[in-house]
Image (cartoon, rainbow, N blue to C red):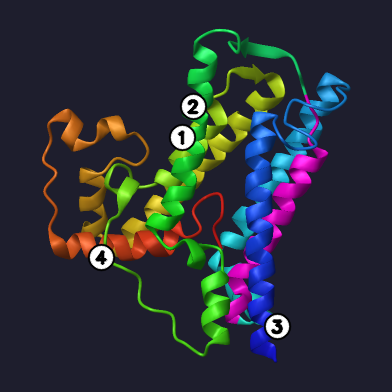
Amino acid sequence: MIRAIIATYGLIAYVSFLAVFVYLIGFMWNFGVPKGINEGEAGSFVLAILVNAVLLALFGLQHSVMARPAFKRWWLKYIPKPAERSTYVLLASAVLGLMMWAWQPIPHIVWDVGDTPAGPLLFAVSAFGWIMVLASTFHIDHFLLFGLKQATFYLLRRRLPAPDFIVRGFYHLVRHPLMLGFLIAFWATPRMTVGHLEFAIFMTGYILVALRYEERDLVDELGTAYIAYQKRTPMLNPLKHPILVGGDDRRDARSGQAVVRVVVETELSGPIARP
């Protein structure tokens, strides 16, 4: 019975993620959802800035605290391991949903190029960012990332397979393509308001800071193997890739395999969704 309950719980958490992810896209695009980032009744400018800052801080706090190994060890005393990731996904989805529901629009225009040729171009770039985010989850292990695989394997009494030691897709271009996709999606907009700008600035800062800690953890765990990966693959900017700047892109199999193992284990969470 407990296995069926955990499997159902994992499915609920996964569906919740899908719903919130799709809503987030509509929220950023102000399209197809009850309330977009620029929609709603505008109130006091200062109050809106403060309320949004609190919501963003809550988002960052939830992800940062739950990312700590000490917290993970503590809550595993109360949550079955097969349900651990699903619980994180469910809570992260709830916090993100709360942030979008309570978001205060600040409609003051920073730029608006919707009626120019740049408008459709920026929309297309944003769409590419969201595609990169989703594709990157499949370049690692999409269903493991969102907890469904753990719950399903527990139901079937199967052991999770070892991580696949292969660099796939966008991970050839940058070390953190999932985060790059988010940055593109957040900033590429035909109509930038102050409220959208506040969101984009906070998320950018959070991602950059979190990636520094992530990179440090990877170097501590892998040592020279990850340092070699760092040298041949830029963190976020694909324009710095050795192929484009004329550098050496040779990969030795041993370090490449080790790097991918840990990248898979850590990028499963990443700075926006780390367990």
Return the disc, 4 or 2, that comes first in the chain's sequence: 2
**Element carrying mark 4:** helix
Residue range (magenta): 81-105
Residue 157, given in percent of the width and then of the height, sits at 51, 90
- The quarter of the picture where residue 24 lies is top right
Residue that label 3 marks:
5
Percent x, y of residue 209: 50, 42
SS for dot 3:
helix
Closer to the chain start, of discs 3 and 2, is: 3
- State the predominant SS element of the stretch in magenta: helix
Q: Residue type at mark 4?
A: Ala
Q: Residue at x 81, y 30 (%)?
A: 104
Place of residue 79 in the rendered image (x, y in percent of width and height, measured from the top left): 67, 79
- Which disc, if any, is residue 258? 4
- Residue 208 in sight in this render: no
> In front here: 68 or 108?
108
Real-space Cα separation, disc 4 to disc 2, in angstroms: 36 Å
- In reply to whether residue 99 is colored magenta, the answer given is yes
Q: Which residue is mark 2?
A: 124
Disc 4, disc 2: CB below 8 Å? Answer: no
Q: Amino acid at mark 1?
A: Phe
